[in-house]
Amino acid sequence: MLQTHIQRLEERILQRVEITPTIQRIMSIPGPAEILSIVIDRELGSIDRFPSPKHLASYSGLVPRVGASGGKVHYGRMINQANNYLKWAFIEAANVVVRQRHHRNWRDKYVVQLYERTRQRKALAVGATARYLAEAAYWVLKKGEPYREPAPRHPAGLKSPASPERGQAPA
């Protein structure tokens, strides 16, 4: 009963909202589908309001509280003073990543690897994933390009396959 009501509401939203290039760019990020992308687009407004991805993450409430005293810094839960619709949308998108992480099409995605890496260290992995999605949304909108997976990083000291061996001239 409730699920059919939700589906009817989503259909009405999709009928009334034109899927713009901005919404399509947000949909290219792993996680947010059509409805979440519409919410994110409408709540963000112009991306030019934010000078950096950190400012967007802070506006969205996806940064921890910080308390410092006597040279020690303590990080707490996410801040409450934020745009709660954006916070909700990015956390829901992160939950999509968490639910889909075992699917074969999702296993190799950077955001899934980020979630798994963060989950091993601390319990706030969904929040960290949501922050990554917010920062990815910033860059997607700022550059006007669809989301691309980050290039794999090589740990320090390892040679990349593209670099020539020592003593050899580049090809």
Image: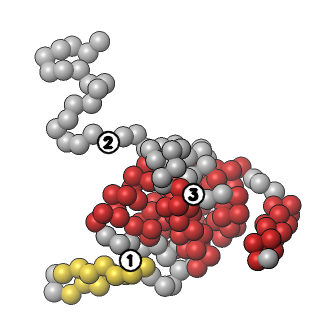
Of marks 2 and 3, the one in the foreground: 3
Q: Position of residue 123 (x, y in %)?
A: 35, 72
Q: Are marks 3 and 1 in contact (CB under 8 Å)?
A: no
Displayed quadrant of residue 114: bottom left
Image quarter of the C terminus: top left
Q: Which residue is mark 2?
A: 153
Q: Amino acid under label 3?
A: Gly
Q: Secondary structure at mark 1?
A: strand
Q: Which of marks 2 and 1 precedes in the sequence?
A: 1
Q: Secondary structure at mark 3?
A: loop
Look at the picture and state if 52 lies above or below 139: below
State the residue in front, 44 or 25.
25
- How dense is the environment of label 2, judged by Cα within 10 Å: few (below 14), some, or many (20 and up)? few
Q: Which residue is mark 3?
A: 31
State the residue in front, 124 or 21.
124
Q: Which residue is mark 1?
A: 64
Image quarter of the N terminus: bottom right
Q: Which of marks 1 and 3 precedes in the sequence?
A: 3
Q: Amino acid under label 1?
A: Pro
